[in-house]
Image (cartoon, grey):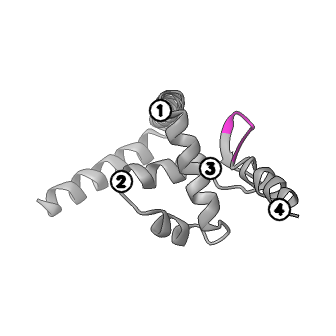
């Protein structure tokens, strides 16, 4: 009986807390990205706080995702850096496209942005 319990425990411990799909990392069986967990962890949020931000996750899943990150930290940090670069490139391309295709709208947006910045100072 004890062997059976130990076997069941080992199977549970081997559960995949993180899976890869669609070119990204996700908490196993969910739509929550590992990115979201890692950014919270890097900001100093506790696993309990992170869990509160994602009600579909269990505390065990959050700890599992953090453990996964820590075990592959350099690989995941590089993945996140590339994702940030891709996001920035897409953002710049979208801005450039808007500036070219709708210059009046672009000008209004830039004026509003400048006004908002000057009123905050």
Q: Which of marks 3 and 4 is in front?
A: 4
Q: Which of marks 2 and 4 is nearer the N terminus?
A: 4
Residue to which mark 1 is pinned: 77
Q: Marks 1/4: CA distance?
A: 40 Å
**Disc number for residue 2:** 4
Residue to which mark 3 is pinned: 33
Q: Earlier in the sequence, mark 3 or mark 4?
A: 4
Q: Marks 2/3: CA distance?
A: 16 Å
Residue to which mark 2 is pinned: 43
Q: Is residue 20 left or right of residue 68?
A: right
Assess whether mark 4 and mark 3 are in contact (beta carbons under 8 angstroms). Answer: no
Identify the residue at the far front of this view.
Answer: 2
Type of secondary structure dominating the magenta stretch: strand
Q: Earlier in the sequence, mark 1 or mark 4?
A: 4
Q: What residue lies at 45% left-to-right and 33% top-to-bottom?
A: 88
Q: In this view, does 12 lie to the left or right of 107?
A: right
**Disc number for residue 107:** none
Circle 4: is it few (<14), some (14-19), or many (20+) Cα within 10 Å? few
Tally the numbered discs.
4
Tell me where residue 37 appears, x and y as whole percent: 53, 53
Q: Marks 3/1: CA distance?
A: 14 Å
Residue 20 part of the magenta-drawn span: yes
Question: Please, what secondary structure does the residue beneath circle 4 have?
Answer: helix
Question: Please, what secondary structure does the residue beneath circle 1 have?
Answer: helix
Q: Give the range drawn in magenta.
A: 18-24
Q: Marks 3/4: CA distance?
A: 37 Å
Q: Which of marks 2 and 1 is nearer the N terminus?
A: 2
Assess whether mark 4 and mark 2 are in contact (beta carbons under 8 angstroms). Answer: no
Tell me where residue 68 appears, x and y as whole percent: 58, 42
């Amino acid at each position: 009986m004890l062997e059976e319990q130990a076997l069941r425990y080992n199977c549970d411990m081997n559960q995949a807390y993180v899976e890869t799909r669609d070119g990204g990392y996700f908490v196993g069986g969910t739509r929550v990205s590992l990115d979201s967990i890692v950014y919270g962890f890097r900001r100093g949020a506790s696993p309990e706080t992170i869990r509160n931000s994602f009600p579909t996750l269990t505390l065990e899943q959050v700890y599992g995702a953090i453990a996964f990150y820590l075990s592959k930290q350099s690989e995941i940090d590089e993945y996140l850096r590339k994702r940030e670069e891709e996001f920035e490139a897409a953002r710049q391309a979208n801005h450039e496209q808007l500036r070219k295709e709708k210059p009046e709208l672009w000008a209004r947006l830039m004026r509003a942005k400048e006004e908002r910045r000057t009123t905050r100072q």
